[in-house]
Every structure is written in C-alpha cells, then in structure tokens.
Amino acid sequence: MALLIKTDIDRGTAWAEALATAYPELDVHTWPYKGDPADIEYALVWQPPEGELKRYPKLKAIFSIGAGIDHLASDPDLPEGVPVVRMVEPGLTAGMSEYVTYAVLGHHRFMLDYARQRAGKLWQEIPQIAAGARQVGMLGLGVLGRDALEKLMPFGFRLAGWSRTPKSITGISCYHGEEGLREFLAETDILVCLLPLTPETEGILCRETFDQLPEGAAVISVGRGGHLVEDDLLAALDSGRLSGATLDVFRKEPLPKKHPFWTHPKIFITPHIASMTIPESACQAVVANIHRLEAGEPLRHVVDMERGY
Ligand code: NDP
Ligand code: OXD
C-alpha cells in the first residue's frame, strides 16, 4: 500500500520517518513520484499543484496536512468521489490555542502600545483593565476555536463564540447565523477569526463587521487571509475604530515586501505560523484513518466539499 507526501516546506523527510515508525508496512514516497501513478492509494498533501491529484487513478483518500482544505477545494480538477480528510491532531490544536492565548493577552495588556512606547523610549503606564470586563469573541466554534476559548477560561474573560449551527457550551455564550452575529459582535472587545475560508466566510472581517464591534476593539485573524478586507482594516485602525490587529494569514503569502501591514504601528504580524501540523503526532491520526478505511470502517474528519469545510 503506497502513500505519497507533498508538503510545502521541507518536512517530507520528517513525515516519512514518522509514518515509517507508525506504520512500517506503508510504502511512503515523497513528491514528485516517478513510478506508476496507479501505485498510489493515499495522498498526504499541502497545496499540491492544481490537477496533480487527478493523476493517481487508484486514490482511496486525500489527507490534508492542514486543518483548512481551501488549498484543495480551489483545485478545479480535484478527483471526484475521493474523500478529503482534514487534519485534526493534538499538536495542531495545542499550537493554535497557544497562539490565540498569546495574542488575546497581548491586546488585553496593551502590548502593541508598549512596543510603540519602547520605540520612543517613553515610560508611561496605561491603566489595566480587568479580564472580566472584556469579551473575547471567536468566529468559528470548531475544533480549534473551541479549544482556544476553553484554554482562555482561567483568565476570567467573558467568552463568546459564533458558528453556523446552534451550540451549547458551558462557560461560552454561543451565537449562530446572521442574527446571532450582530448580537455577538456588539459585545466583543477582542475578536478572533478561526473560520474556514468558504464563499460564505470570505471577506467577513470587513468594515460592516468592524463597525458593529465596540469602539477600540482588537482583531486577531488566524483563519485565512481571504477573511480580511485589508483596506477596511487599515481604515478602521487609522480612524481609531479598532485599537490593533494580530495577523497570521494574508491574501497573498508571503506578504509582499511593500505591503502597508509590515510597518503599521497597530499591526502585529507573523508568517502563517499560528499553528503547524506536527508529523510525529499527526501521523497517528492519518494511520488510524488508513486502518479504518482498510477495515471497511468510515473515515473520521471527512470534509463536506459542498459545505466547504
Ligand atoms: P472546524 O471545521 O472544526 O470548525 C469550523 C467552524 O467554523 C465551525 O464551528 C463552523 O460552524 C464554523 N463555520 C463555518 N462556516 C460558517 C459560517 N458560514 N458561519 C458561521 N460559522 C461557520 O475547523 P477548525 O477549527 O479545525 O479550523 C478552522 C480554520 O483554521 C481552518 O479551516 C484553517 O483555515 C484555519 N487554520 C489556520 C492555521 C494557521 O496556522 N493560521 C492553522 C490551522 C487552521 P459549525 O460548527 O456550525 O459547523
Ligand atoms: C492549516 C494551516 O490549515 O496550517 O492547518 O493553515
């Protein structure tokens, strides 16, 4: 049984080694595969070239190396009828919760302001605000959004989340749908986006959304760059409507050198590293799913390609 790995950064070897340990019988190849395409039954991929996956006529499943599958959904030649499985693994979840916690606390404790003050050698205290006086609102109450909110619980923030379908989670005020969004935004001081990128969520971080947040709210964008209307963010920061933003994902990655985000004093930037799939823990999820399929059991975390996540 053969599996082909295509990663974007040089982690093919780490994956191959992890898979060889977890499933020694699996014949693992790193992309590009020079043999007969009909050998390949499983693909484990991040941003494969368009049309690439159609070359393998015996594919049984496509595993996304990331939680997001927009890099596959955008392929007009994605083979039909082959299940796409998104990545759900403890390393990826833990990494995202660390990042979101750091970013939320950074905005809560005015770290962008203090970075500006440090640049001007300015010693000036900003009055502290109690965590309980702020609401952290999460767009997306899936695997990652929910875990991040749960990790924030001990700090005492008011926590809220917004999803497509109704939810009930202890300690989190849950909202859904368009109606719910208005109510959710009106009380949210620190807004985090952990939605998948779909036609419904594209551009959701826009002027209309920012205008519904309390004056001086902060935005943390960690889902996908396509969620953010970049000019609307710049206008909201420059007018003072928003106090700051932490951005990990961008419409164009790497972020072009001349992009105004790089030098904006109210923006903190990271290069799409909020969380990374860790081969050693993630290969367990992939291997368990291959065993399931081979035993005739249903795969876990199969994407509904119609819904887009
Ligand atoms: P899930 O599929 O588990 O959760 C998605 C959540 O979004 C669900 O709660 C879903 O609602 C909600 N949602 C989807 N569409 C809508 C909509 N139209 N309106 C309201 N809510 C909606 O995804 P994950 O939590 O695993 O991952 C989320 C995203 O995080 C990924 O798709 C990826 O883009 C991004 N990501 C970014 C990383 C980074 O390093 N920057 C790393 C990993 C992931 P419902 O529950 O009702 O279905
Ligand atoms: C993901 C990502 O989707 O890293 O997992 O962006």
Image (spheres, rainbow, N blue to C red):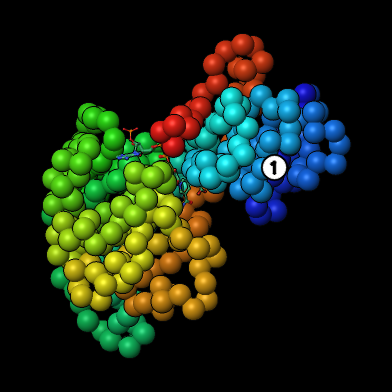
Foreground: 17 or 308?
Answer: 308
Q: Which residue is mark 1?
A: 52
Check the picture and name the quadrant holding the C terminus.
top left
The image shows residue 307, relative to residue 224, as above or below, that is above
Residue 91 shows up from this direction: no
Residue drawn at (69%, 42%), measured in percent from left and top? 52
Residue 126, image quadrant: bottom left
**Percent coordinates x, y for residue 300 in the rendering:** 51, 23
The image shows residue 257, relative to residue 9, as above or below, that is below
Residue drawn at (32%, 38%), measured in percent from left and top? 141
Foreground: 14 or 258?
Answer: 258
How many numbered circles are shown?
Answer: 1
- Badge 1, how many Cα within 10 Å: few under 14, some, many 20+? few
Residue drawn at (53%, 45%), measured in percent from left and top? 74
- Decide if residue 223 is on the left or right side of residue 154: right
Name the quadrant where ligand 1 sits: top left
Q: For the residue marked with disc 1, what is the amino acid?
A: Glu
**Percent coordinates x, y for residue 191 in the rendering:** 26, 54
Residue 45, image quadrant: top right
